[in-house]
Amino acid sequence: MSDRIEKFVYHGEKAERLDKFLVTCLPEFSRARLQGLIVDELVLVNGVIAKKSGQALDDGFEVEVRIPPPVPSNLTGEDIPLDIVFENDDLIVVNKPAGMVVHPAAGHASGTLVNAVLGYDPDMEGIGGEERPGLVHRLDKETSGLIILAKNERAHNWLQDQFRLRKVEKTYLALVDGKPPTPVGRVEASIGRDTGQRKKMAIVSAGKGRESVSEYKTLETFKDHTLLEFHPHTGRTHQIRLHCQFLGCPIVGDSVYGKRTVTATINRHFLHAYQLKIVLPNEKQPRTFEAELPEELKAVLEEVKRYE
């Protein structure tokens, strides 16, 4: 695959930064990616290699950009079955099973969702100049449900903006021990690292962590448990699990933030990303995707119903 060459001419009454101009010309690339092309001497201004990202362009200046094809990433595609809910040329929506890590990391070099998506579509355009899918949000290893991955940089930037501007509506189902203080409510509590255990997160005082907001409502009440629907407005690490703990009703099966004694027959925590509502690239109306509860969680619900 050969390099892609793009040529533009700047027209404006005032001088403009080179990188800012290129963002308007090549919206499928992030500003950081375009700045990287400038650093790699792949951008010419009036036939001369651009000196820096902030180089000023005057009216009539000609700009040429050489975009190399994506290089293979250090990630390996693997033949792992995927439950694909939706797919187009820009992205893929997957119903992730519990037990699958989203992205390779220390201790999880293979068998991840990213490895599976690369194995499924090895010819995707890629992100950041590499042949890899782009993550815009994550799910914990033991959380099942919907997750969306971008296949190209333009879609990745679009989806990142949707999440950053809080235009995405996410719905989770959680079975908790006990019940919350009120059937319907809103939790606003900052989240930061647990000072005692750095691998854990914790609710911290305002100013010491990041803002986190969730709304919830009760779907069904049992003798010792409650099925809740959660709508997180922010996307902090372990947010819903911490908010349930904060409410005094930890998630069933949560080995980190839950009860020491598991109160149902379950080998994971009962948290499922059930619904995702989002406007996709090149579309104006939002789409709603759903993934029903997996069989192991349905079995847990049947179990708690029998003890009402």
Image (tube, helix red, strand yellow):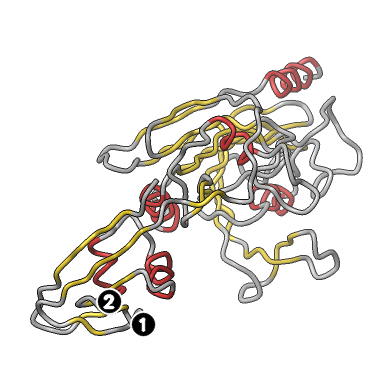
**Residue 52 disc label:** 1
Locate residue 45 relative to residue 200 in the image: left or right: left
| Quarter of image, res 285 | top left
Residue under pointer 2: 18
The residue type indicated by label 1 comes to: Lys
Question: What residue occupies the far right of the structure in this picture?
Answer: 261
Q: Position of residue 202 (x, y in %)?
A: 74, 61
Q: Position of residue 117 (x, y in %)?
A: 57, 35
Q: Quadrant of the N terminus?
A: top left
Q: Secondary structure at mark 1?
A: loop
Look at 46% across and 47% down and name the residue there. 126
In front: 81, or 55?
55
Locate residue 133 relative to residue 81 in the image: left or right: left
Q: Position of residue 63 (x, y in %)?
A: 22, 71
The answer to whether residue 259 is above or below residue 209 is above
Q: Position of residue 243 (x, y in %)?
A: 67, 52
In front: 202, or 281?
281
Q: Are marks 2 and 1 in contact (CB under 8 Å)?
A: yes
Look at 63% across and 27% down and name the residue there. 220
Label 1 neighbour load within 10 Å: few <14, some 14-19, many 20+: some
